[in-house]
Image (cartoon, rainbow, N blue to C red):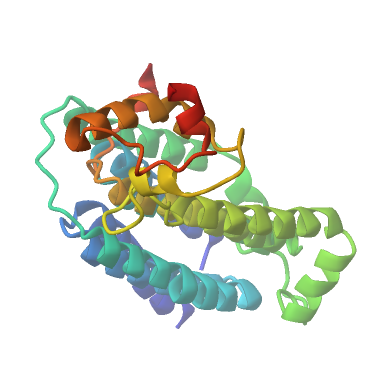
């Protein structure tokens, strides 16, 4: 299987994720779409690792997974704090920091 | 065989991704993401990244998604109101433009000319042994930074999501806190600021607060 097909899949998934981040309003789903984008980047990194025959890309992908796990943890913590204060679960209404 | 596997896995990954974006119920979005992640792990296996594929299934589809499911159950995925904003139209347009741009970059680049089928396969490529060796030699610093980042994120999540005393019903009320004996000149700024207001309310309600605030508490000194 030619490797550019993998890059095409990765690009497609990234675009779907980016569109989801813009369209959806539930912060939970926005986080899920961010995961999609990070996973697309992971797929591209691993494809490049296969292309060059070195494992550096796989190391990068693992680090990206760590960063994604951290982001999810903090994001879900924020979400739990928001729901505990009975604030609306909607990114359009949560603009207190907007100034 | 690998072509069939690729198209199956890629199709499942893309359908899962579309499901994450389009499904209304957040719980179904999470399940679609699990499907997407498993399909992606199959793609990783096809690219001979065995360890990353295993980590993907165990860490992502196993641990992170369980966290998501719990939070969906806790928050209660409320149905979204249909967004009438301009982003509703601009978002898909932006995604489409991004896709076109990425595909132009992909087709125009020389990547496909150089290594269309990848480097020749070495024995032991992508095994845990190889990854572990690289993590402890060439990439030791990123490894340590990642562990520190995980620690910070874990502490941050606990601090963000912890139960705060006094904010929920059934916990101690503010007047009980004020009545609690404590050394003079101690207490939080919030209590110091809130003391006057709460005492006024209590005075209206009970006609005096001398029985609530014991002598020696900082509030009684301020007000007398």
- Comparing B7 with A40, the one in front is A40
x and y percentages locating residue B212 in the rendered image: 35, 44
Q: Residue at x 36, y 36 (%)?
A: B100
x and y percentages locating residue B62 in the rendered image: 46, 77
Q: Residue at x 56, y 74 (%)?
A: B53
x and y percentages locating residue B192 in the rendered image: 48, 29
- Comparing B170 with A4, the one in front is B170
Look at the picture and state if B34 lies above or below B176. below
Quarter of the figure that contains the C terminus of chain B: top left
x and y percentages locating residue B117 in the rendered image: 61, 64
For the view shown, which residue lies furthest in the top direction?
A: A99
Look at the picture and state if B47 lies above or below A12. below
Quarter of the figure that contains the N terminus of chain B: bottom left
Whether residue A93 appears in this view of the structure is: no
Q: Is residue B148 left or right of residue B67?
A: right
Whether residue B187 appears in this view of the structure is: yes
- Comparing A25 with B100, the one in front is A25
Q: Residue at x 10, y 42 (%)?
A: B81
Q: Is residue B83 left or right of residue A88?
A: left
Q: Which residue is drawn at 62% across and 78% down?
A: B50
């Amino acid at each position: 299987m030619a490797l550019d097909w993998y890059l095409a899949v990765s690009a497609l998934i990234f675009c779907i994720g980016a569109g989801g981040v813009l369209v959806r309003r539930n912060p939970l789903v926005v986080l899920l779409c961010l995961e999609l984008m990070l996973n697309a980047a992971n797929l591209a990194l691993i494809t490049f690792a296969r292309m060059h025959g070195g494992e550096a890309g796989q190391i990068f992908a693992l680090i990206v997974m760590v960063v994604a796990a951290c982001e999810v943890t903090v994001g879900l913590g924020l979400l739990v704090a928001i729901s505990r204060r009975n604030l609306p679960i909607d990114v359009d209404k949560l603009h207190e920091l907007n100034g | 065989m690998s072509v069939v596997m690729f198209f199956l896995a890629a199709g499942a990954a893309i359908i899962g991704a579309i499901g994450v974006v389009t499904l209304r119920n957040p719980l179904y979005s999470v399940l679609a993401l699990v499907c997407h992640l498993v399909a992606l792990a199959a793609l990783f296996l096809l690219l001979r990244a065995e360890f990353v594929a295993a980590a993907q299934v165990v860490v992502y589809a196993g641990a992170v998604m369980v966290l998501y499911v719990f939070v969906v159950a806790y928050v209660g995925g409320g149905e979204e109101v249909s967004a009438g904003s301009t982003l509703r139209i601009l978002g898909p347009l932006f995604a489409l433009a991004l896709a076109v741009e990425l595909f132009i970059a992909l087709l125009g680049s020389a990547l496909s000319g150089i290594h269309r089928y990848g480097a020749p396969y070495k024995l032991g490529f992508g095994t845990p042994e190889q990854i572990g060796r690289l993590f402890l030699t060439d990439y030791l610093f990123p490894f340590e930074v990642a562990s520190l980042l995980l620690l910070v994120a874990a502490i941050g999540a606990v601090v963000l999501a912890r139960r705060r005393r006094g904010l929920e019903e059934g916990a101690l009320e503010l007047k009980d806190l004020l009545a609690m004996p404590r050394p003079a000149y101690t207490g939080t700024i919030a209590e110091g600021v809130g003391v006057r207001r709460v005492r006024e309310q209590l005075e209206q309600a009970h006609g005096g607060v001398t029985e609530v605030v014991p002598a020696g508490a900082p509030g009684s000194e301020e007000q007398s």
